[in-house]
Image (cartoon, helix red, strand yellow):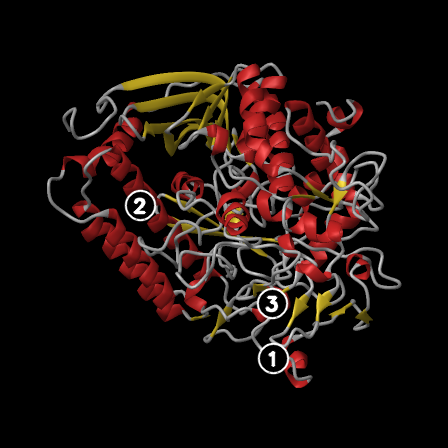
Amino acid sequence: MNQFDWPYSNEFGVREVIDSEVLVLGGGLAGCYAAISAARKGKTVTLVEKGAIVRSGSAGSGFDHWEVACTNPCSQVSPKEITEAFIEEQDHYSNGIAHYIECREGWDRVLDMESFGGKVRDTEGEFKGAEFRDENTGLLFAYDYKNKFFLRVWGSTFKPALYKELKRLKVRLVERTEATALLTKEEGGKKRGIGAVGMNVRTGKISIFRSKSTILTMSRPARIWLFNSDLVGLCEFRPPQSIGSGHAMGYRAGLEFTMMEKSVRGEFSAAGRSFPPYGAGNNHNTWYAATMVDARGVEIPYLDRDGRELKTVSQRYQPAPGQKFFLKGGVIDEAKYAWRGPETMPFDQLMKRGYQLPFYADLSRMPEMERKVIWGLMVGEEGKTKIPVLENYTERGFDPARHMLQSYGTGWQSASFLDQERQLFGAPGGVFHDWDLKTNIDGIYAAGDQLYASDCCGFAAATGYYAGRKASDYADTVDLCQPDTAEVEKECSRLYAPMYRKEGMQWKELNMAVSKAMQNYCGGLKCDDLLREGLDLLNSYDEEIVPQLTCRNPHDLMRTHEVLDILEVSKLILNACLLRKSSSKPLNFMRSDYPLCDPEDDNHFITIRQEKGTIIRGDVPHDYYGDVENGYLEHNQDYVNGGGKG
C-alpha cells in the first residue's frame, strides 16, 4: 500500500501489548454491560470492538422492546414462572441458566440504562391514557397488557448512553479492531484463557491482549447458508459484519458448544426475497397486534389460545380465560398452542372461509394510541426501521390513519422460506456454560449471542452484566501470563497472509462457495453421507482456496477473516449434525437415515468441542442446571444481598 491507496496509516508489522484484568471481546449490548459490570467492581477493563462502539452490534440502530423485565414494579409474574415457560416452550432445548438471569436481572439493567441516559419511560406523556401505559411509572408495556413484563423502550438511545458510561468509567476502548484468536495456557493439565489477539481493521496493527479473564460477547453466526454480495444491507436484520467470529475463535481454542445442529428459519436475510425488516404490513412482534384485512378490506379475526374469536383490539393483548400469561417475542421459534398469545386465524381456515389475498395491515382501524405506538415507537426504534421505514415512508406520504401496507411478511401470510434460506435466528446453538457463564476453559466466560439459545436485548444486557461480575471475581484469583510466542507468531502469519498475495481469489467468492456448500449438504433433510461430503468439500476449500485468497487493503483483509470464520463455523455445524443420530422436532433437525424423532436416549444436549483436530462429544441432561431459582440463589448471594447492585 502507498498513501494514495488507503486513507489510514500503514501499521502492518506493528504490535502492541495491552494488559487488563478483564478483557471483553465484542462491543454490542452484552459487551458494554460486561465491561461496565467489571469496571464497577474496580477492575481494569479493555473492551475490543470491530466497529465503533457508539453504534455497533445488533442494538446499534435501536430496538423497540425489552425482553423481559419480570421484577419491574408493575409485573404480575415471577422470574421463575417466565423462565420455566421459556424452557417448556422450547421443549427443554433452552438455556435455563441464562433465561433466569434475563428474567431476574433484566429490570436491574433497565434501571442502569435509565441512569446512563437511555430513554425508558414516556416522560413527556406522549401516550398518556393508553391502555399499555402505567400512569404511575410512565412505563409502556407490550404484548401482554395484564402481566406487564415486556417493556416498550426507545432503544435507539441505548448504545450512545452505554458508550458515554464506558467513557465515564474509564474502560479502555479499542475500536476498529477485530478479535481473531483466543490465547490459552496449560496449567495443571487444564487450559486457561490468558487473553486474545486482535488486528486493527484500518491500519493492520496487531494487538496482543493479556488478561486474567476474558468474556466473549460477540454475535451469533450469519452468512452461513445465505450470501449475495449485491443483496445485503436493509434486508439483513442483523449487521452483515456480525458473523460469529466468537464462535469460530472459540471452536479453534477448544470451547464447548451445544445445539449447533439446530436449524432455525430466518425471516429477514440477504437472500434477496425479503423486504426491509418490519417494512411491510404484518402482525408480528413490532407490528403486534395490528389489524389485518384481506384484499376486499374484510377484517381477519384474532383468536385466543382456546380458539375464541376476539371482538376488540384490547382483547388481543389479554390472556385467555384461565391463562395466566402468554409469551411473545423472538425467543419463540414455533410457539406451542398452550402458551402463545392471541393470533390471527390459521391460514388454511382463512382460505376455507373465503378470505382473499393479498392481505394488508390496516392501522387505521385501531385506536389512536395503538396505531401511534406501532407506527412511531415500535416502527422507528426496532432494528433499522427509523430511517428506511418510518422516515422514508412518512416523507413519501404514508399515513397510518388513512393508508394500509401490503403484507409480504411474517407468520401465516408469508411466502414460505426454502430450507437453504436459513440463518441462525431465533434461539440458536452457542457456547455451553455453567452457572457462572464460564466455559469449559478456565478464565473464559460468555454472554449475549455467544450463548446457546440466546434471546433479545434484555438477555444480552443481563447476561453481559452477570458475566462481568463472575469474570471479575475469577480475576482476583490469578495472575497475568505471558502468551506463547510461537502461538502469537502463527496467528499473525495467518492474519497477514492474504495481503502479500498479488493475485488470487477474493473473499466474496469463498463466502458464496461456502453458502452453496451448506445449502447442498446441510439443508432441510440430512444424512451422514451428505454431511460428510459437505465436510470434505469445506476441507478442500481450506486446503486449496484459502491459500489463494488475496486482499487490497485492511478492510478487504477484515472481510477475508470474516469468511475464514464463516468457514470454521460451517464445519462446526456439520460436525454437530453428524453427532445427533436421530431427528428432532424442537431442533427442526430431520435426517433421512435416522427418521426416529426425539427418542428418549437422544433427547438431551449434545455438546461438541475439538481437541487437536479430534471431535469430542458430550451428552448433558436438559435439566443439568437444576431448579433455576435455587441455582441462581446458590451462585449469587452477593448480588441478592446487595440489592441488585453487585
Q: Quadrant of the N terminus?
A: top left
Q: Quadrant of the C terminus?
A: top right
Q: Which residue is mark 1?
A: 356
Comparing 130 with 614, the one in front is 130
Which element type, helix, strand or loop, lies under badge 3? strand
Drawn side of residue 636 relative to residue 518, left or right: right
Q: Amino acid at mark 1?
A: Gln
Looking at the picture, how far across and down is residue 574, in whole percent? 40, 59
**Which badge, 2 or 3, is on the more N-terminal residue?**
3
Total marks placed: 3
**Which badge, 1 or 2, is on the more N-terminal residue?**
1
Distance Cα–Cα, label 1 vs label 3: 11 Å
Q: Which mark is residue 360?
A: 3
Looking at the picture, how far across and down is residue 19, in whole percent? 43, 16
Q: Amino acid at mark 3?
A: Tyr
Which element type, helix, strand or loop, lies under badge 1? loop
